[in-house]
Amino acid sequence: DGGPNQIHVIHLGELSGEIS
């Protein structure tokens, strides 16, 4: 469990923080 999907979620969060 927690494959590419989890990584994608983390990436989205990191990107959001940078964009904010």
Image: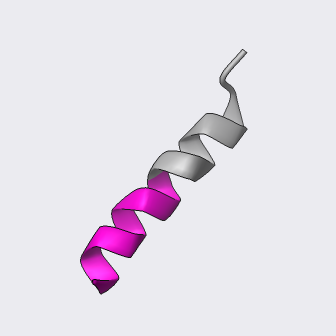
Which quadrant holds residue 18?
bottom left
Residue 13 drawn in magenta: yes
Specify the quadrant that holds the N terminus.
top right
> Does residue 13 lie above or below 3 as drawn?
below
In the image as oriented, which residue stretches furthest toward the top? 1
State left or right for residue 5 relative to residue 15.
Answer: right
Q: Residue at x 29, y 70 (%)?
A: 17
Q: Residue at 39% across / 73% down in the picture?
A: 16
Q: Quadrant of residue 6?
A: top right
Q: Residue at x 66, y 23 (%)?
A: 2
* Percent x, y of residue 9: 57, 49
Q: Which residues are magenta?
A: 11-20
- In the image, 8 versus 20, the foreground residue is 20
Q: Quadrant of the C terminus?
A: bottom left
Q: Is residue 3 left or right of residue 15?
A: right
* Above/below status of 11 relative to 20: above
